[in-house]
Amino acid sequence: MLNRHEQRSVRHRLSLLSALAGLGVTLLAAPGAAASPPFDPRLDPQAVDWRMLRFHASKLFVSANAEVRFERMPASAAAAELSAVPEGSGRSPGGSQVVRLHVESKLGGKETHEDVWFDAADGSALERRKERLGKKPYIATVRYGTDGVYRHRIAPAKDREAHGPRERWSGLETSFEPFDRASGGLGEDSPQRPVIEPLALFYLVSAAHLEAPGDRLETVVFSRHRLVPIRLEVSGIEQIRANFEDRTQARTERRRGPIEALKIRVEDAGGADSDFSFLGLREGVEIFVERSSRLPVLVRGKMRIVGRVDIALTHAERR
């Protein structure tokens, strides 16, 4: 007998399969027996020491909170969680392990819950599910293939539906969006790079061996319906004033004062007009990572209207 959560998951998968099958669009399946090698073999899942991170930011009239939970699982277990799409079209895990990040965020009066699944070896995106709570709620799924993404969005079509069960929401939208590989720097003559989700940057800055000024990692994010080439580069080492609770299985301590951190700059070609977005930051994004623990301790960048914002770590739980 399936529990309520399992029943909802099954209904969601069947609904997505049924809706997308009507599109008549087929993606090329990623080869199973001849999986592509990892984009950057330096990515090390074992270097990710944290299980949960909490961040907070406040400026002017805007307050933001985010909680990020990290889980690594066998590829077979992750495949069972991914949404069903027409046979052979959804991208399958290319390695033996998959990472799932669960992110709950509040920005002003908006609250969202997101889950992203991606390959542990190179960060290649498999799926994103996003649920907005409160006013104008919706549930949106982006399922990745080799040549594009399937989108499935369900929302209340009428005001009275918003107060009822989600199974009765009737505002359904489905589509297939092919990748514009040329704009994403993925042409035939370009280096093979994975397409990642922006939220996977939390993982990359911990798992990649970005250890000294000048170290860099180039990849492509799918953000706001477009492929955006980005580069992560260590631009310096700085002393960051920290104030967060650090919890391990053996101890809990309040860490205050300066810590030595790598400043990892996230560069993309678009600048202020770019489609790249990370935690609501659109320009000048920098992620500060403690050198000794690989903990992301600060995210800095520009947010529209309010300008530069510091999103600081307030709580960390480690393995």
Image (cartoon, rainbow, N blue to C red):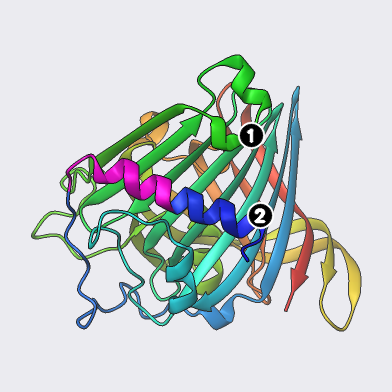
Q: Could you say where residue 16 lies in the image, as x and y percent from the top left?
A: 39, 46
x then y, percent, for residue 186: 19, 55
- Residue range of the region highlighted in magenta in the rendering: 14-25
Secondary structure character of the magenta stretch overall: helix
Q: Could you tell me which secondary element the residue under label 1 belongs to?
A: loop
Residue 115 lies left or right of residue 218; in this view the side is: right
Where disc 2 sits, the SS reads: helix
Q: Residue at x 47, y 62 (%)?
A: 117
Residue at the image point whose x is 24% and y is 77% from the top: 32
Q: CA distance from mark 2 to mark 1?
A: 13 Å
Give left or right: position of 275 versus 200. left
Kindly identify which numbered label has been placed on residue 212. none
The quadrant where residue 297 appears: bottom right
Q: Residue 165 got which mark?
A: 1
The foreground one among 31 and 248 is 31
Could you say which disc has been placed on residue 4 in the image? Answer: 2
Q: Is residue 19 magenta?
A: yes
Q: Amino acid at mark 2?
A: Arg
Tag 2 near tag 1, CB within 8 Å: no
Mark 1 is surrounded, within 10 Å at the Cα level, by few (under 14), some (14 to 19) or many (20 or more) other residues, namely: few
Q: Give the image quarter of residue 59.
A: top right
Give me the residue at 83% from left, 59% from top: 244
Residue 279's place in the image compared with 218, above or below, is above
The residue type indicated by label 1 comes to Pro
Q: Is residue 68 magenta?
A: no
Q: Is residue 235 visible?
A: yes
Residue 140: horizontal and vertical position, in percent? 47, 40
Report the number of discs. 2
